[in-house]
Amino acid sequence: MSLDRADFDAFFTAVYGGHRPFRWQDRLLDHILHTGHWPDQLVAPTGAGKTSVIDVHVFAVALMAAGHPVRVPRRLALVVDRRALVDDQYEHARFVANQLADGRGGATVLARMADALDSLRVRRKGPADPPLWTALLRGGAQPSREWLDDPVSCAVLCATPDMWGSRLLLSGYGSRRQAWPREAGLLAYDTVAVVDEAHLSQQLVTTARRVAELADVVEEPLGAPVLQVVETTATPRTDAGVAVGVEPGDVEVDEPLRQRLTAPKPVTLLPLASWPIPPSGSARKAGVTALADEAVRLRQEYGSTVGCFVNTVAVAAAVDEELRTRGMATALVCGRLRPYDVARLRPPKSTLLSIGGDPAVDVLVSTQTLEVGVDLDLAAAVTELAPGGAIAQRAGRVNRLGLRTTTAISVVVPAAELPANERLGQPYRRDDLVAAHTWLAQRQSDPAGLAPWALRDPRPPVPALRRDLLQRLELAQAWHLARTSDDLAAPQDDLDLWLSDDLDEPDHEFGIVVRRDLPDDEADAVSLIEALPPREYEVFPVSIRKAATIRARLKPGSVLVRPGDDQPRPLTDDDRLRPGDQIVIDSTTELFTSRVVDPDGKERVDDVLDALDEPKPGEVVLRIERGIAAHRRLLDAVAAAADHPDELDPREVARLLRVHREELAPRPMVVVAADLLDRSEDEPAGAEMRLYWQERDDGEPELGRLIVVDLRKATADAELRETWTPRRRPVPLRRHSEAVAERAEAVATRLGLDTGLVETLRLAGLHHDDGKADDRFQRSLRHGPVLEEPLAKSGLRDLRTIRRLRTASGLPTGWRHEQLSVVRAWPELSTLDDKRRDLVARLIGTSHGHGRHDFPHTSEQLVGGADEVAVTLFDEGSWDELIERTHNCWGVWGCAYLEALLRAADGQVSAEGS
């Protein structure tokens, strides 16, 4: 393949519709290519195009894959404390990934880059595998996991500080405990983290750089590049290391950049007698009227679309209603929307949240939701007073390209001194609002107003640090966090000490999911959610600060989905919500205002589980329920086709779905579900069908519900793929182990690890499943007698059946085959030197995320007798000592990284059906 530095222009223009990169973006790329390191600071005002770090990263990795001699990080983590910007960056990353995937097979720069990125991976590429992996790590959403299984490929991760930082500290919010080490290892090595709005995440930057220090100072370096941390800012600091970004000369030379950054945005202050706007009374009416009056005036003077930014959902809804009564065409976008609803506001569904906008909309009313993360080009804006950084971001949505000849920004401020109340009924603190008011009064006299280039000095006031000092992570604390298999004395929430700038009110998130007809019976509801767990696109992110108020309004029967738990369970009064938890509620619950969760809301929202127009692999869901007349006819036809309630051919169900497709909704799901069911025995399983029978009044069985679940991404479930294969045939243990060993060797070689570590990973892969040969484990894989040749995978697809067989097998609760794998492999490791033996044994024992530091079973429970190796390791404490010796030698994050590589190799092989 042919790719060189000169191709960056063509790639950039292909992604950005003909726009060439700015000079500072070229300098950033050259700095990375010359040094292999990203700068410590990225200096770029609002509107300068910071999202282009994604394009710079992807091109640099593609160039490395094509033969450029400088090693650059494979993974980019974009971290920012504004969830709207996280979502926007994720959408851009997905757009780039899709452009590359669509460009495959040609001679364009996109095709050549796709070929280069494809050449990085060693896994067998599936038809849906993009050249670039993307992941969204945001509270309330199911975390993406594909990047974990492909550590040699290019990836872009878009995350909030708590979701990224908790993973770096081996305690990932919203992740299963067994995933924590592999997430931490891959984030601490071969990754660059760009922390946007870094002044809002000072503690996170401090912690991330400390992790990089600890990962770099070890007895046995891995040879892989350690984490690089970049903080973005509008104004450089001389004490923060190497800086790359926009320079004064760029503004003179780059005309589009000059227009964006220097076009005047005059600001006017509008004093309001009663501000903040109270929740009721005449003063509230006056405040809402004042905002509406100014929005109408700006629309008449500057055209559409005018932005109206307010600070609370309730005020946004009131202003929207007032404008509509005046005949204004409005759009209301506020609060933390679920991804499904956000997608409805973006192209191709709508042009409203795009740089072209929608001229039919007179006023766009919003809260903080649209401060960042969308390329709006508003004609003008009116906004409530907010902290300086928020005002600057809101102004950044006005005349974004600098092509309008005139514009204006009006800010509603208090006519008198703010009350002493700290919160004032606002999401912001009093001292931040006072500082912003003073700063805006100064900006009002400057003709440039809130133009981004004019805000370099004096810059918008930065919120005061809400803690006495920043905390430094020490090695002993890292060792404590590394005990990921143990129930630690310090709970997860204590990570705020190392992640949050505000220890009083860290803004973690949980998720709320709306489902129709949630069964009244708790066991039935749990069973239904287990079969149909929440999908990323249907989760409302909700501040955990609101948890108590929201829970008080929930109906009985809500279901709690907690990462790490074996299955969902009914939500009880004793459950304390954690970051990443999800609550499934019935669609009759009145808990919403303008499609966002509101503790005082009185509206409902629809269930969108099966509402996707174009479902992607893993997203196909079909629910056929007796309560719907059209569904009832299909269920009767399905039941009539079965001689016995448990004997039904999926291909026959596929035929019946096609026969009834015209009367079933939603049709896209029906058509795809039928195709997935209609597969031969030799093809990979496409979907799982579940039938729920109920007893009629006459005692006869009746089919009450049919569910079809897409299996094309089932191998992303780490628990399931330990015993499951997408192929319907069982997998022999020896074949699986040899395949994992070969893949682990290939992964380590591709990453450039030294030959000793390559051999270590190969041996660990060869022996990681030795314990599966145990007769009890073999009985847990299949019905009938134990086969002569042990199996690694059963071919069973139903997790409930797998659990039932496990219970009947005679294995003790919590038994782990990899604990026995260490015992069985130990004699074959005796030829290795002590250090290498320890590391291979550690990787075998931790190959599924357990055993860090302890296993739950004694030698008697493990092998049923006095085995000397088992007694020494697991009765006398030598395993714990082995874990600590490897930490001493390769480091906490180094060991986690090697574990991640082995587990990725195992995951790849399992996903391929071996």
Image (spheres, helix red, strand yellow):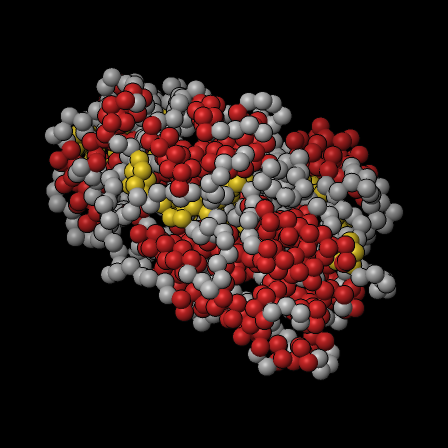
Is the residue 282 above or below the residue 847 in the image? above
**Residue 238 percent coordinates (x, y):** 23, 45
Question: Residue at 73% across / 78% down in the picture?
Answer: 864
**Residue 137 percent coordinates (x, y):** 47, 47
In which quadrant will I find the N terminus? top right
Is the residue 262 above or below the residue 834 in the image? above
Give left or right: position of 540 versus 912.
left
Question: Residue at 39% across / 63% down in the picture?
Answer: 494
Question: Residue at 72% across / 43% down in the picture?
Answer: 687
Q: Nearer the viewer, residue 199 or 117?
A: 117
Question: Residue at 43% across / 51% down in the picture?
Answer: 227
Residue 505: tell me if it is visible. yes
**Residue 590 percent coordinates (x, y):** 47, 45
Residue 590: tell me if it is visible. no
Is the residue 677 above or below the residue 766 in the image? above
Is the residue 485 above or below the residue 277 in the image? below
Q: Nearer the viewer, residue 655 or 770?
A: 770
Give left or right: position of 295 versus 809.
left
Count the numbered circles shown: 0
**Residue 597 percent coordinates (x, y):** 43, 45
Q: Nearer the viewer, residue 286 or 706?
A: 706
Direction right: furthest residue: 643
Determine the image quadrant of residue 779: bottom right
Give left or right: position of 453 versus 510.
left
Determine the image quadrant of residue 563: bottom right
